[in-house]
Amino acid sequence: MAVEKVDSLPKTMKAVVNYGPSDFRFEEIKVPEVGPQEVLIRVGGCGICAGDVKTFHGAPRIWGGDGHPAYIKTPVVPGHEFYGQVVALGERAKEKYGFSLGDWVVSEQIIPCGRCRFCLRGDYWMCERHYIYGFKKDEAEGAFAEYMKFPVNSVNHKLPDGFPLQVAAYVEPLGCAIHAVERADIGFEDVVVIAGMGAIGLGMLQVARLYHPKLLIAIDVIDRRLQLAQKLGADLALNAQKMDAVDEVKKLTDGYGCDVYIHASGHPQGVIQGLQMIRRLGRYVEFSVFSQPTTVDWSIIGDVKELDIRGAHLSPWTYPSAIRFLQEGMVKAEEIITHVFPLEKFQEAMAVAERGDESIRVVLKP
């Protein structure tokens, strides 16, 4: 079967291309061609992740301390929080994914190899090859562009009829938030603290609320974000710059500390705060992407508190739930997506996303 595509597909497109730290360029490049089992979409929008900002500035943790990329192969089109409309289907792609031309779709941020030990046992989000959209040239180009391709092995999902497209770029962050909360094993009697009320932290907050914990506490240093956190379900919102958050949480728990601490701020101080705040035998979930190494007193983890430390990476098996939560209004994202910029104003959008004083999630639209 030949490639199925719309009649008006152009040969070239506008895109943002990453050539290196602080060297993102707005260019005209070729529209990708699809092969067997591949999908081409016209990008509807793509969020700017904190990782994109760190990539733009060349954070050593991401690029490698010697100046060579740690997991980036340039030149590459960035962007992994996207949605779009199907405009071309390669051979067997329609049957494989159940897509038709014109469908609104999303693709999970990782393209697993399907062959490593992790993929073979179903742990595809930890794939050893680990190709994520927007970081490796020719393997997984991203969505800071008018069009993008879902390659072979991509994990794709159709958005249902009537899905609110204004929040479709939030499916990826929400999927990550769901996985982190699942890792926390929240119970009805738990006091839960979520530190970092960015786009993913606010998603974690709303998902954690669905577990009906005894007390749900949000921590940040920006009052506007804390006000939104309370609107979205936090029982308490603490500004860690204006009070001793550790002392406050311990007062609320008879001196013991919280049962669950989920860290999503990406700030090293949030790690130290969490280890001090959490009770003995508590559960600490780390989601953040750090721009530099973080040093902590590991004796707290073992000798003092015997903590259960759990990492959370990406969004395995959570996209269907993320789509459903947004479709049914169980998670609200309208006030989390605060800014929308045209693609050609990506530098201004990056600056707004980095400051974070007025923005939460910034979206680029081609």
Image (cartoon, grey):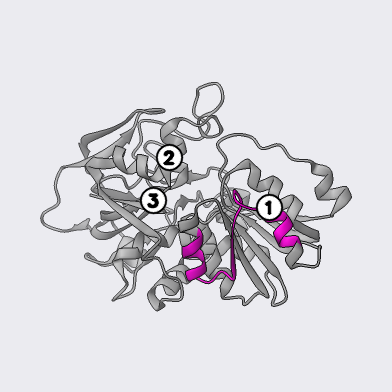
- Tell whether label 1 touches label 3 (CB within 8 Å): no
Give whichever of discs 2 and 1 has the lower sequence position: 2
Tell me residue 111's x, y (percent): 46, 50
Q: Is residue 236 visible?
A: yes
The residue carrying pointer 3 sits among few (fewer than 14), some (14 to 19) or many (20 or more) residues within 10 Å by Cα, namely few
Going by the numbered disc 3, the residue's amino acid type is: Glu
The amino acid type, in three-letter code, at marker 2 is: Val
SS under mark 2: helix
Bounds of the magenta segment: 226-250
State the CA–CA distance, disc 2 to disc 3: 16 Å
> Position of 31 compared to 339: left or right?
left
The mark closer to the camera, 3 or 1, is 1
Location of residue 218 in the rendering, given as x and y in whole percent from the top left corner: 58, 61
Q: Which residue is mark 1?
A: 244
Q: What residue do we see at 31% from left, 35% from top?
A: 17
N-term-proximal mark, 2 vs 3? 2
Q: Marks 2 and 3: which is nearer the front?
A: 3
Residue at horizontal 56%, vertical 33%?
61
Q: Which mark is residue 53?
A: 2
